[in-house]
Amino acid sequence: MLTPVIGIDLMGGDFPPETLFENLLDFFRERPQKVRLVFYLPQALIDQLKPLSKKNLPDDLEISFVEAKEVIQMEDDPLLAIRSKKNASIPLGIQDLSKKKLNAFVSLGNTGALIGASKVTLKTLEGIQRPALLALLPTKIRPLAVLDVGANVSCSAKHLTQFALMGVAYQKCLGIENPKVGLLNIGSEKRKGRSELVQAYQQLQQLNEENPSKPFLGNIEGKEAFLGHVNVLVTEGFSGNIFLKTAEGMTAYILERILDEGLDKHKESSFSSLARDLNYAEYPGALICGINSVVIKCHGYSNGKALYSSILGAINLVSTGFIEKLKEKLSLDL
């Protein structure tokens, strides 16, 4: 396979771009990958970081830079920003992705601007009205695909049903033969929740009647999501974002408390394994699912390890032909 080319936007995160860049180089030295990384940065940062990109790097790692003459701030209006700041890292990276100069794009920047630029420039897949942010969370059995975790504050029943189909197709691409779907709600009864949730329940039940594998298991309360009974959890972006960040915050709190209490030596290996499974930085960022390319949004508070995991996730999606597989599996269901 040709060397995958991954665009990287380091602007807009909580950590300085130069710190993230140095952290990434350290991770790639430890675990080399065949990849070309293209960084979209202001010229002053390029001048600062270019010398570092030539020091003791693995042979399979190539690094190049593209100047971003403008910066989209986190507080900028997303649609206004992508129209008025066409030379910022996000519009430049998405344009290069559309021109096939990149195979994937990974960004820490303004979520709304990234989604807006992706929708306008890359277009959505056939049969999908709105893209969704898809994130993986650990469970007792295998990682759970949650969508939407922040792209759409409100959704219709039809949108939620399309999210379910995308989640099922995504998990099938990862090798799960018959993924099961749950609808995030305040109770398991079919008439629970807002009207769009009741309607989505009915539409997903209809899918069960048309599909012998019966993917829809019904409404799921948040506390049940981590049991691993479902592979796809569907919700709108407002609740999904709260669910995701609450889960990450609670996980960090529990792990910190365990460490504060101290560990017996014979328990240290078990704790290390648990901490690795529950650490958000071990998982790729959120995939903008439903557009015609691989675009991954990282948390603004992502550290170098989280960014590295997101790049590895992008490489994996590109090398396995994820977009074409997703189109194929969606065409069978829509």
Image (cartoon, rainbow, N blue to C red):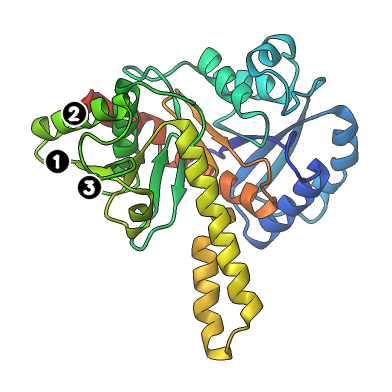
| Dot placed on the residue nearer the N-terminal end, 1 or 2 | 2
Are the residues tagged 1 and 2 within 8 Å (C-beta)? no
Using the numbered discs, state the Cα–Cα distance from disc 1 to disc 2 in whole angstroms: 13 Å
Is the residue 227 above or below the residue 332 in the image? below
* Spot occupied by residue 214 in the image (x, y as percentages of width and height): 14, 40
Q: Which residue is mark 3?
A: 177
Badge 2 marks a residue whose secondary structure is helix
* Spot occupied by residue 207 in the image (x, y as percentages of width and height): 16, 30
The residue shown at (51%, 39%) is 241
Q: Is residue 260 left or right of residue 322?
A: right
Q: Residues within 10 Å of mark 1 (few under 14, many from 20)?
A: some
User: For this rendering, which residue is in front, 44 or 12?
Assistant: 12
**For the residues carrying marks 1 and 3, which lies nearer the camera in this image?**
1
Query: Residue 64's image quarter?
Result: top right
Is the residue 7 above or below the residue 245 in the image? above
As shown in the figure, which amino acid type bears the numbered disc 1? Lys
Tag of residue 228: none
| Dot placed on the residue nearer the N-terminal end, 2 or 3 | 3
Using the numbered discs, state the Cα–Cα distance from disc 1 to disc 3 in whole angstroms: 12 Å
Q: Which residue is mark 1?
A: 214
The quadrant of the image that shows the C terminus is: top left
Q: Is residue 318 visible?
A: no
Q: Which residue is mark 2?
A: 202
Are the residues tagged 2 and 3 within 8 Å (C-beta)? no
The residue shown at (72%, 29%) is 74
Using the numbered discs, state the Cα–Cα distance from disc 2 to disc 3 in whole angstroms: 24 Å
Q: Is residue 300 visible?
A: yes
Q: Residues within 10 Å of mark 3 (few under 14, many from 20)?
A: few
